[in-house]
Image: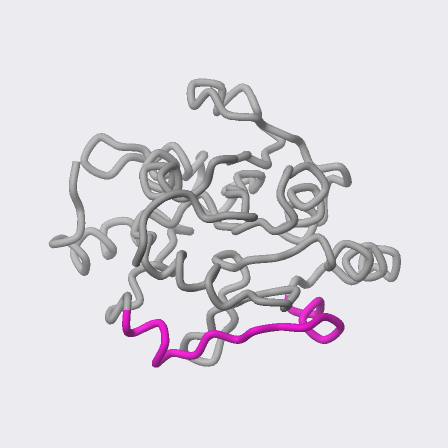
């Protein structure tokens, strides 16, 4: 797809999790010497003129020299990160991604942005699941997110019931990412080894 920055969209990396299942900050775990969050950034930097990190541990990411924001309301999980991201980004829309997804696909991300039109959310669907942390959200979502939080509902997928969503189907994803590598993430140390084995041909320095 065409190069250059994606217009009207900021990049948002969610790095606020405690990584409790992994045992340490998984965003800083390395594959071939490159931390996962740097692998994420390597794909995102050419795509977005504005990139922010949402984290409650800003000291750990200072070396990236990017704007960082702590959750405005802590303890809400990813929904709280999306709320904060939408409040702080300069653009009307943000592409939100988790910090532990090392195989992002720039062409797929460009495609998600290209089909956003007047939708509030653009989210891939894969194996019957919503990839809510590899998705585009607009500021139109903010009132509905605030309502969910007020009602004590913190599941991101509940947002999709009250906004206009463009669901990106598996056949669309396959055009850019036939193995669905984009959505691979790491929660436990054993998963890192499995990922290295499964996608060894995609791992570069």
> Relative to 165, is 20 above or below?
above
Query: Which quadrant of the rendered structure holds the C terminus?
Result: top left
Res. 96 in view? yes
What is the magenta range?
Answer: 157-175
Q: Is 173 inside the magenta-drawn segment?
A: yes
Residue 201: x %, y % from top left? 11, 54
Residue at (40% x, 63% y) in the render: 111
Query: Which quadrant of the rendered structure holds the N terminus?
Result: bottom left
Q: Is 196 inside the magenta-drawn segment?
A: no
Residue 84, located in which quarter of the rendered image?
top right
Q: Nearer the viewer, residue 93 or 62?
A: 93
Residue placed farthest to the right in the image?
150
Residue 82: x %, y % from top left? 65, 49
Residue at (68% x, 63% y) in the render: 155
Residue at (54% x, 34% y) in the render: 53
Q: Nearer the viewer, residue 167 or 153?
A: 167
Q: Viewed as shown, does residue 15 lie left or right of 90? A: left
Q: Viewed as shown, does residue 155 lie left or right of 58? A: right
Residue 29: x %, y % from top left? 34, 35
Q: Viewed as shown, does residue 41 lie left or right of 174? A: right
Res. 105 in view? no
Residue 172, located in which quarter of the rendered image?
bottom left
Q: Viewed as shown, does residue 49 lie left or right of 69? A: left
């Amino acid at each position: 797809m065409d190069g250059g920055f994606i217009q009207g969209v900021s990049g948002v990396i969610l790095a606020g999790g405690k990584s409790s299942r992994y045992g340490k900050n998984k965003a800083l775990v390395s594959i071939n010497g490159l931390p996962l969050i740097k692998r994420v950034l390597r794909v995102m930097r050419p795509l977005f003129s504005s990139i922010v990190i949402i984290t409650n541990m800003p000291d750990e990411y200072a070396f990236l020299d990017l704007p960082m924001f702590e959750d405005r309301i802590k303890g809400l999980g990813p929904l709280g990160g999306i709320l904060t991201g939408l409040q702080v980004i300069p653009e009307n829309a943000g592409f939100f991604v988790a910090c532990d997804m090392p195989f992002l696909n720039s062409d797929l991300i460009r495609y998600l942005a290209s089909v956003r039109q007047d939708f509030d959310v653009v989210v891939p669907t894969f194996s019957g699941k919503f990839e809510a942390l590899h998705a585009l959200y607009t500021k139109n979502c903010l009132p509905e997110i605030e309502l969910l939080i007020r009602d004590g509902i913190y599941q991101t997928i509940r947002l999709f019931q009250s906004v206009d969503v463009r669901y990106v189907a598996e056949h669309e994803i396959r055009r850019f990412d036939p193995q669905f590598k984009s959505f691979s993430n790491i929660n436990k140390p054993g998963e890192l080894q499995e990922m290295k084995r499964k996608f060894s041909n995609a791992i570069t320095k």
